[in-house]
Amino acid sequence: MIPFLFFALVAGAVPNYDIDNLCKSAGAGGGGVSPVAGCITDEKAAKERLIKAWPHYPASARQECAADLPLDIGKSYVEMETCFQMQEWKAHLDDIGGAHVPGAHVPQLR
């Protein structure tokens, strides 16, 4: 029953993570406020992008990316967003690289 409830939560909406705690823990060794503030800004921006894109991600990707984050200090929206990007890349391996990628200006070897 618990795995079903977890899946329902993951499939329904972007999870709520404690980004203040995450960023303070990650910035503890940095010795300044700027890294923490930058982290919070990045996390909030990533969460907003995830909220907009969430309905378009497959349920299996939502479950994997929301449940399988490796950080010991807390869950990260930036890490979750990266997970979704990797899921997309795996689904379209033939599209990785090439002239359609911004910044790629050299012929691709095949």
Image (cartoon, helix red, strand yellow):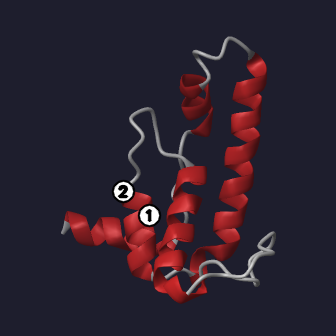
Amino acid type assigned to the residue bearing label 2 in the image = Asp
Position in image of residue 31 (x %, y %): 68, 11
Horizontal side of 45 relative to 77 (left or right) equals right
Would you place residue 21 above or below residue 79 in this image?
above
Report how many numbered discs are placed on residues in the image.
Answer: 2
Q: Residue at x 56, y 30 (%)?
A: 21
Question: Crowding at label 2, few (<14), some or many (≥20) Cα neighbours within 10 Å?
Answer: few
Position in image of residue 28 (x %, y %): 58, 17
The secondary structure type at the circle numbered 1 is helix
Q: Classify the position of the N terminus by image quarter.
A: bottom left
Horizontal side of 33 relative to 86 (left or right) equals right
Q: Residue at x 54, y 47 (%)?
A: 76
Using the image, tell me which numbered label, if any, was put on residue 19. Answer: none
Circles 1 and 2: CB atoms closer than 8 Å: yes
Separation (CA) of disc 1 from disc 2: 6 Å
Position in image of residue 19 (x %, y %): 60, 39
Amino acid type assigned to the residue bearing label 1 in the image = Cys
Q: Residue at x 54, y 24 (%)?
A: 25
Position in image of residue 90 (x %, y %): 46, 78
**Residue hosting label 1:** 65
**Residue hosting label 2:** 68
Q: Nearer the viewer, residue 74 or 102?
A: 102
Q: Classify the position of the C terminus by image quarter.
A: bottom right
The secondary structure type at the circle numbered 2 is loop
Q: Residue at x 42, y 40 (%)?
A: 71
Would you place residue 52 above or below residue 30 in this image?
below
Would you place residue 99 above or below residue 71 in this image?
below
Q: Nearer the viewer, residue 47 or 81?
A: 81
